[in-house]
Image (cartoon, rainbow, N blue to C red):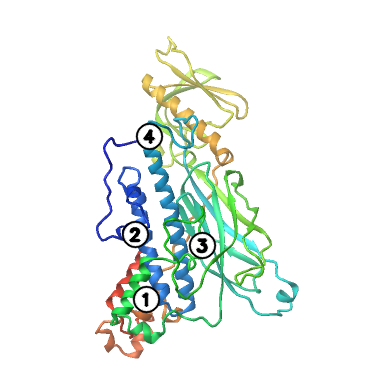
């Protein structure tokens, strides 16, 4: 691991959100010292702090229930990301300190230089069955209980949230069908799935009245309140504490009126749960029936969890080869070999690999394949590689490269490939299919949908001359409600950072 000999230098931009957190004593400056490994983590923390501040301000200014639910969800997700990133940054600092002291990582034990490849991990079609009472579901009796729920999914420092779903007794399942993709998961990954719930009240009480909101730009005291709100975020506004325990990073709770999410259930998935078909997993219920956000969960979650290791979708090694089979030892073929997935594909020319041409022949590569470097053959004037495949009977191939260095590189590639396949196990038996998520819905919504942005941003002077007919043709025209430039800038920044 790269390590500097001299002291590291802190790189916190003056006036940035990170500097404000340091001044308030919520971060230790020593944690933010610059290094080649943690600069990217610091940038990600900066971004999440900005999103958290924007979500906090929006939560204080929301005038509709749906807006407040989304803002509170964003706040919880951002808090969880900051906690995960700060935990990662702290661990990196500890490892760097141990390296400076000449000691190994805190994990201890012998550290193998060979590391397995990472994978593209996807979870999709999440279905959580509900178990309503007969009187509630079939007879439609009792008080209508409605909750807003979403899932928070985490692998390491990658944290994503699902869409928000309103659940009542008319639904038998809570469904999140869109795939969530993690781009850099190790074979030892731990995917934590958390289900958050918030009771949806019919008579939603906003934090500010419309009249108060319209005066927000002219009142200095109101501006100070928003500044105070931006400096901290609510653990209670974000619901339960995020995975990993209490965060030393997250500020104290805000006295913001609005929806509060709570952890309802959770589960953890690992490599053993990966397969192409759907599987059912047990859920751990985190609260009781007396809670206002309670939903009658059946106790299970059905989903599809698949993985694509990089060794299955990327070229591990390629180069010019001479190949012969044991069945015809005199027939040498010049080929361009590409080691990828479960095959060593052999083409006539390198250009054929880009044009998706069918290879001349392929050699199966799996856990049953044996590869070894042979002694230097006087007849070949070079060292060769022997590949014995067990597919449809035992077949042995001999491979010769141009130089001994190429032979060494191919052997290293084979050993790395076998190691990757041994770590990812069933994921390397066949390539699993991953569906790409659909494009995010645009944040531009109609007035009927109640976008806070279009509800508050003042129209330009030219828009005031538009007739009512032109407004009906363009539903995205903002309402004529003068607010401060600070709030306009806040909303624009929030949507840009979030999406």
Of the image marks 4 and 2, the number of the one nearer the N terminus:
2
Q: How many angstroms separate mark 3 from mark 2 (CA)?
A: 28 Å
Contact flag, marks 3 and 1 (Cβ < 8 Å): no
Contact flag, marks 3 and 2 (Cβ < 8 Å): no
**Residue at image mark 4:** 99
Q: How many angstroms separate mark 3 from mark 4 (CA)?
A: 39 Å
Q: How many angstroms separate mark 1 from mark 2 (CA)?
A: 27 Å
* Horizontal and vertical percent position of residue 484: 29, 79
Q: How many marks are shown on the rendered structure?
A: 4
**Residue at image mark 1:** 453
**Residue at image mark 3:** 162
Mark 2 packing: few (<14 Cα in 10 Å), some, or many (20+)? some
Image position of 173 (left or right of 414): right
Q: Which of labels 3 and 2 is toward the front?
A: 2
Vertical position of residue 194 compared to residue 289: above or below:
above
- Residue 428 — which label? none
Q: How many angstroms separate mark 3 from mark 1 (CA)?
A: 22 Å
Which residue is located at x 40 percent, y 69 percent? 56
**Residue at image mark 2:** 21
């Amino acid at each position: 691991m790269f390590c500097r000999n001299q002291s590291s230098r802190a790189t916190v931009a003056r006036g940035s959100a990170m500097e404000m957190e340091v001044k308030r004593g919520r971060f230790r400056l020593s944690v933010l010292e610059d290094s080649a490994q943690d600069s990217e983590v610091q940038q990600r923390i900066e971004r999440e702090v900005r999103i958290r501040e924007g979500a906090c301000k929006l939560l204080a200014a929301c005038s509709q229930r749906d807006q407040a639910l989304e803002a509170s969800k964003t706040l919880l997700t951002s808090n969880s990301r900051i906690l995960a990133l700060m935990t990662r940054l702290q661990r990196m600092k500890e490892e760097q300190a141990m390296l400076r002291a000449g000691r190994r990582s805190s994990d201890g034990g012998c550290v193998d230089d060979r590391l397995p490849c990472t994978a593209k991990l996807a979870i999709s079609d999440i279905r959580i069955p509900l178990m309503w009472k007969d009187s509630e579901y079939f007879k439609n009796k009792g008080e209508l209980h409605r909750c807003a729920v979403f899932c928070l999914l985490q692998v390491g420092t990658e944290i994503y949230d699902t869409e928000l779903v309103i659940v009542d007794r008319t639904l038998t399942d809570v469904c999140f069908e869109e795939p969530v993709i993690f781009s850099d998961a190790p074979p030892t990954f731990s995917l934590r799935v958390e289900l958050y719930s918030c009771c949806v009240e019919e008579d939603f009480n906003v934090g500010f009245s419309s009249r108060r909101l319209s005066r927000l730009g002219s009142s200095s005291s109101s501006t100070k309140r928003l500044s105070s709100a931006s400096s901290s975020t609510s653990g209670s506004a974000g619901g339960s504490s995020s995975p990993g325990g209490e965060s030393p990073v997250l500020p104290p709770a805000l006295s913001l009126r609005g929806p509060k999410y709570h952890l309802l259930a959770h589960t953890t998935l690992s490599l053993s749960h990966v397969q192409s078909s759907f599987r059912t997993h047990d859920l751990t219920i985190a609260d009781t029936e007396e809670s206002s956000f309670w939903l009658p969960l059946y106790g299970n979650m059905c989903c599809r969890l698949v993985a694509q290791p990089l060794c299955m979708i990327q070229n591990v090694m390629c180069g010019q080869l001479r190949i012969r089979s044991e069945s015809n030892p005199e027939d040498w073929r010049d080929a361009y070999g590409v080691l990828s997935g479960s095959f060593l594909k052999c083409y006539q020319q390198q250009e054929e690999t880009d044009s998706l041409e069918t290879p001349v022949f392929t050699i199966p590569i799996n856990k049953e394949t044996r590869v070894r470097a042979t002694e230097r053959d006087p007849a070949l004037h070079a060292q060769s590689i022997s590949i014995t495949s067990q597919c449809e009977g035992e077949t042995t191939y001999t491979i010769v490269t141009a130089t001994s260095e190429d032979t060494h590189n191919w052997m290293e590639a084979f050993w790395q490939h076998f190691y990757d396949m041994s770590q990812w196990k069933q994921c390397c038996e066949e390539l699993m299919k991953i569906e790409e998520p659909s494009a995010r819905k645009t944040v531009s919504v109609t007035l009927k949908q109640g976008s806070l942005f279009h509800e508050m941003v003042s129209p330009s002077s030219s828009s005031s001359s538009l007739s009512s007919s032109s407004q009906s043709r363009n539903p995205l025209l903002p309402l004529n409600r003068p607010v401060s430039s600070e709030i306009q800038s806040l909303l624009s920044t929030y949507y840009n950072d979030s999406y």
